[in-house]
Amino acid sequence: MGRVVRNLGDNAARHARSEIAFDLAEQPDGRVVLGVEDDGPGVPPEDRERVFERFVRLDEARSRRSGDGGDADDAGGSGLGLAIVAELVAAHDGTATVTDGRLGGARFEVTLPPDPALRDPALRDPALQAPGPGAPRPGHRS
């Protein structure tokens, strides 16, 4: 998940004019939603699924390298960062989407399902559970 956060942050930094925001929330059903947004140009609706494909770079992103107003030091990227995000999130049974953000640019959201081990006591790691009443405590000799 560290790679997911890093790639989304790098993408936002590449396209932001001056502001990036991260947020994290747990939904009532246990799903976790990570949001990353910026105040850049956004992603047109017709490209919102395509940006998660390998080697896809939108025209605006490519033009940032060519000297027409973009940062001369911006190496542009390979078009793999968001594809890696989508693949890693899918491997965890989650989804990655992009919409319009509150800052005026794109908002990328990663939604992950609840962790069954945290919801179902039968699946919890016994080593992490608190001992019941009268049970010996770890490190305590009776």
Image (cartoon, rainbow, N blue to C red):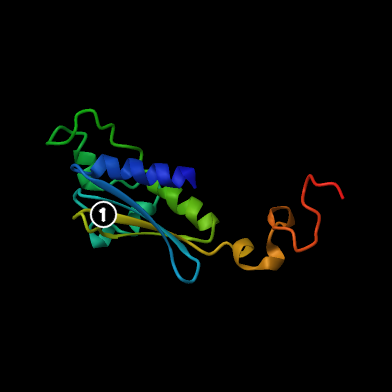
User: Residue 19 location in percent, x, y?
Assistant: 22, 45
The image quadrant that residue 69 belongs to is top left
Circle count: 1
Callout 1 secondary element: strand
In the image, taking residue 130 as reference, residue 76 lies left or right, namely left
The image quadrant that residue 133 belongs to is bottom right
The image quadrant that residue 106 belongs to is bottom left
Q: Between 77 and 56, which is closer to the camera in this rendering?
A: 77
Residue at image location 19% in from the left, 50% down from the top:
41
User: Residue 136 location in percent, x, y?
Assistant: 81, 54
Determine the residue located farthest toward the right in the rendered image: 142
Q: Could you tell me if residue 117 is visible in this image?
A: yes
Q: Between 132 and 60, which is closer to the camera in this rendering?
A: 132
Relative to residue 67, is residue 8 depicted above or below? Answer: below
For label 1, the crowd category at 10 Å Cα-Cα, with few meaning under 14, some 14 to 19 and many 20 or more, is many
Q: Could you tell me if residue 80 is visible in this image?
A: no
Determine the residue located farthest toward the left in the rendered image: 69
Determine the residue located farthest toward the top in the rendered image: 73
User: Residue 78 location in percent, x, y?
Assistant: 36, 38
User: Residue 89 location in percent, x, y?
Assistant: 48, 55
**Residue type at numbered disc 1:** Ala
Residue at image location 24% in from the left, 43% down from the top:
15
Q: Between 139 and 4, which is closer to the camera in this rendering?
A: 139
Q: Between 88 and 57, which is closer to the camera in this rendering?
A: 88
Residue at image location 19% in from the left, 33% down from the top:
71
Residue annotated with mark 1: 106
